[in-house]
Amino acid sequence: HKEYPMNSDQLKGKWNQIKGEVKQRWGRFTDDEIDKVDGDHDKLVGMIQERYGKTKEEAKREIDSWHI
């Protein structure tokens, strides 16, 4: 299948399918944290910032550059 950059709507819509890939990509997240994100782009941005010490812009770029 073709890969496209991940946007907020795709993140929300595909969340159940991609939770495992989120855990692989950002391995410091617990299963509970991933469940709490529940496909919410802003929550994922905040968790990446907190857990990895990134700026908001860096975290957004990481998500936006992720291809699923």
Image (spheres, rainbow, N blue to C red):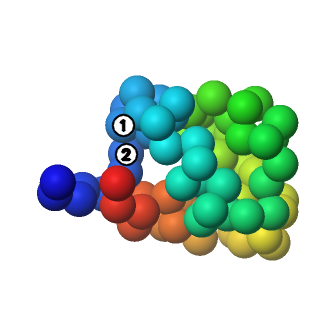
Q: Where is residue 51 in the image (x, y as percent from the top left)?
A: 83, 63
> In this rendering, would 48 be left or right of 61?
right
Q: Residue at x 72, y 40 (%)?
A: 34
Residue identified by numbered label 2: 7
Q: Is residue 5 above or below residue 62?
A: above
Question: Can residue 56 be seen in this snapshot?
Answer: no
Tell me if label 2 and label 1 are in contact, CB under 8 Å: yes
Residue identified by numbered label 1: 10
Q: Where is residue 8 in the image (x, y as percent from the top left)?
A: 43, 39
Label 1, residues with CA under 10 Å away: few <14, some 14-19, many ≥20? some
Q: Where is residue 18 in the image (x, y as percent from the top left)?
A: 49, 43
Q: Is residue 68 above or below residue 65?
A: above
Circle 1: residue type = Gln
Kindly state the secondary structure of the residue where label 1 is placed. helix
Quadrant in which the N terminus is drawn: bottom left
Outermost residue to the left: 2
Quadrant in which the C terminus is drawn: bottom left
Locate residue 21: give its quadrant. Answer: bottom right
Camera-side residue: 36 or 56? Answer: 36
Q: Which residue is drawn at 66% across and 55% down?
A: 23
Question: Label 2 to label 1, Cα distance in Å?
Answer: 5 Å
Label 2, residues with CA under 10 Å away: few <14, some 14-19, many ≥20? some
Q: Which residue is drawn at 65% across and 46% down?
A: 44
Q: Position of residue 41 (x, y in %)?
A: 56, 40
> In this rendering, would 15 be left or right of 32?
left
**What is the total number of numbered labels drawn onto the structure image?**
2
Question: Can residue 42 be seen in this snapshot?
Answer: yes
Circle 2: residue type = Asn
> In this rendering, would 65 be left or right of 15?
left
Kindly state the secondary structure of the residue where label 2 is placed. loop
